[in-house]
Image: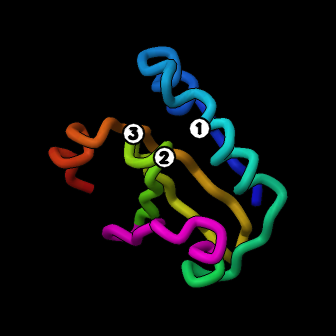
Amino acid sequence: MHTGPYKPMRGFAQKHPNTRSALEYWYELISGRSFRSIAELREVFPHADRVDGWTVFNIGGNKARLIAFIHYGRQTVSIDRVLTHSEYDRWRP
């Protein structure tokens, strides 16, 4: 899958350096793979959830939540934002 933009990941990792390696690992796992559905995605990311059209990933054992839009037909992932667990609890799509 083609992933872009990574600006939300970089900004979050600057504020929360303890998540940098987990975010890099997520990026490594999703890049260059093909997923045709949420079911296939969950084979690699078992805790990925669909929330109102978005896909939410738990990062680093719940240190963060990465929110992305995935277009399976085009094989693209658009990262919307990365939030702490408490920020995610207040987030509304």
Residue type at numbered disc 2: Ile
Q: Residue furthest front?
A: 61
Is residue 36 depicted above or below 70 in this figure?
below
Give residue 60's position: percent from left, percent from top.
49, 43
Mark 2 and mark 1 residues within 8 Å of each other at the beta carbon: yes
Mark 3 and mark 2 residues within 8 Å of each other at the beta carbon: yes
Q: Which mark is residue 23?
A: 1
Q: Quadrant of the N terminus?
A: bottom right
Magenta residue check for 44: yes
Which residue lies at the image location 72% right of the left edge and 54% below the top edge?
A: 29
Mark 3 vs mark 1: give the one in front: 3
Residue type at numbered disc 3: Lys
Q: Secondary structure at mark 1?
A: helix
Q: Which mark is residue 63?
A: 3
Distance (Cα) linking label 2 and label 1? 7 Å
Q: Earlier in the sequence, mark 3 or mark 1?
A: 1
Residue type at numbered disc 1: Leu
- Residues in magenta, as a range: 41-53
Q: Which mark is residue 59?
A: 2
Give residue 86's position: percent from left, percent from top.
21, 39
